[in-house]
Each structure stands twice: as structure tokens, then as C-alpha cells.
Image (tube, rainbow, N blue to C red):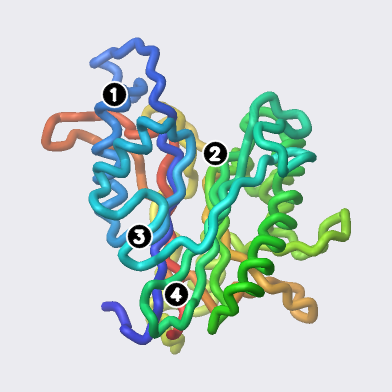
Amino acid sequence: MSNPAIEEIHIVTINVKNGIFNGPLRPENNCDERPWTERKSRLVDALLSTGPLDILGAQEVYNWQLKDLAELLGPSPIFYDCTKFDVVKWGTTWLSTTPEIPGSIGWDAEITRIATLLTLKYKDPSKKGELVHAVNTHYYHKDTTARAESSLLVRSSIRKWVEDIEQKEKPSKVGPVVFFGDFNSPPDEDGYQNMTSLHPLPSGQPSITFIDTYTHLLSLSSASPPSTSSSPLSPLQTRPYGPAFTYTDFAPPNAPQAKRIDFILLGAEVDNEANRGTVRGGWDVLRYACIDNYVEGDVDGWNARWSDHRAVRATIARLD
């Protein structure tokens, strides 16, 4: 049951798998990739079945796929709920040593990768101009250097973006900074660790660091079981819900899986004395789910995966 004194934001990230399909289509193999025409409605149904969606970040989306998703999601545009937010500003950073040059390619990557930055403002006048910052990305998938360097770049770019906008807009409260997407980088790799490090950047540039909603909720629920917690944000989940890993390929359900590479991170303030990070602006992680992408026989008899990634969903909250 929701508490009206608590402000919640529902966030989803999903790599939809690009719509290029070269076959073959083998009906006898449930886990072969299926055409986008079959996958799209089931992907959207899965997302909508989990509850309200405020901000959604998608990766590997061609323009024609984006139009399909926007149509299936109804009157609210993809990426954000236009009944709740107005756009303050959006922009693009190219993940390279020249991030201001469109199309630039960085480090050991072979193709262009970007981060899309978006700042939203609540429509509700009682919020007095409160902001939400969201940054969506899809890191290079092959070599590790580009991912590691991209994270250092993005930490600096997001810090400047947030500071510049907040100085101009002067919101009444500190807003959350959401960084989400397909990092192609598991937690033991530098691409992830550089984003969640409590240490300053090697370059000395001002930066922001991030907390993983998955591990943060895990630590909260372990320290304060929902049955005994006195937190006004209770009840907390007993653990992050769903499969631990987010990348499945188009493999059978029982195939070995060992990659958590899709993340929802929250901007953090570093507590140097405690040597830990706390979520910026008093926000916290209320719920986390990894939404399975395998449909085991729906009403049409469809058995397949609607993407090669599972969706990740988090609800963050703050006492209003």
C-alpha cells in the first residue's frame, strides 16, 4: 500500500535487441531469436505488467522500433511520463576523448557510443521546481578499455550537467541522478567499478559517483528485515527480486548464465568518514526487480524470449 507522504519514481532499463532479423526461424527451437514483430508487444506487456513507469531507458533501438514502442505504451512518450514531468533539457555526450564531437569514437571501440542526458521537472506546482536527472547509455561490447574510460568520462560529464542545470533552475530540493543502461560490463570489471568507486577521478576533475540499486537494496534488506524495520519507507523487499543475471542471449532457460550487465545506478554523496556512499538528496531504493524475458507459452502458444536481455526495474523513494 503506497504512502501519500512518500514520493516514488519507477525506473526501467531494457536492451530491446535491435530489430534486424536474419533468421533462420525454426519453430521447433523455442529459444531462437524471433522477429521484432513477434517480440515487441510481449516486451511491452512484460514492462506494463510490473506497474507504473515514470522513466524508461532503452538500448539498441532503431527509430522504427522506437515508434512501435511509443505506440504500444500509449499516450505517454517512451523515456518519461509526460503527465508527471516536463523536459528541462536534454543532450548527448559521445563516449570518446572528444565527447563534444558528434560521431566520435573512443579508445579501443570500433563504433560510436553515446550517453543521453535528460533533466525533467515535476509538473506538480507543489513540488516547487524539483528536478530528476536521468542518463541512459549502452557501452561498447567488445574490449574493456572503452568501457572503463567511458565510465570516468561520464562521471565527470554528469557532474557538470547536474551542477549547471541546478544552478540555473534552483530547485527546492536536491533531485536524484539516475544512470542506467547496458554497460556490457559485469561488476568485476572496470567499466562498472569506475562508476561506483568512492575515489576521485585520476584526472582530478570534479565528478559524481554512483550506487547500484541492486547491491544497495540487498544491503538495506539484510540490515533491516522488513518485518522489524522502523523505516518510514517500509516494507522493503527481502532481497532483489528475480534472476540475478540480466543478459541471457537467446539461450534455453536452463543454459548457464553469468552476466549482470544491465544496471540502474543512483548518484551518491561520499561520506569520507564512514568510507561509503549515500544516495543523493535523501532518496533510497524501495524495490528492485529483474524481469524475466522468457515466455513459456502465452495465450497464443508463444514460447520464446522477447529480447536477449532481461529488463531491470527499480523504484526509488523519498519522504515528501
Spatial CA span between label 3 and label 2:
33 Å
Going by the numbered disc 4, the residue's amino acid type is Ala
Spatial CA distance of label 3 from label 4 is 17 Å
- Residue at position x 72%, y 43% from top? 99
Q: Are marks 1 and 3 in contact (CB under 8 Å)?
A: no
Amino acid type assigned to the residue bearing label 2 in the image: Ala
Residue 137, visible in the rendered structure? yes
> Who comes first in sequence, dot 3 or dot 2?
3
In front: mark 1 or mark 3? 3
Mark 1, secondary structure of its residue: loop
Q: Measuring from the top left, give residue 58's x and y in whole percent.
A: 45, 43
- Asked if residue 215 shows in the view, the reply is no
- Looking at the rendered structure, the kind of residue marked 1 is Asn
The quarter of the picture where the N terminus appears is bottom left
From the image, tell me which residue sits under label 2.
258
> Could you say where residue 63 lies in the image, as x and y percent from the top left?
41, 33
Residue most toward the left? 299
Task: Please report the residue visible at 32 percent of the width from the left and 27 percent of the height from the top.
Answer: 36
* Element marked by disc 2: loop
Q: Farthest bottom residue? A: 230
The amino acid beneath tag 3 is: Asp
- Check disc 4 and report its element: helix, strand or loop: strand
Badge 3 local density, few (<14 within 10 Å), some, or many (20+)?
some
Q: Split into 4 quadrants, where in the image is the C terminus?
A: bottom left
Q: Earlier in the sequence, mark 1 or mark 3?
A: 1
Q: Which mark is residue 317?
A: 4
* Residue that badge 1 annotates: 30
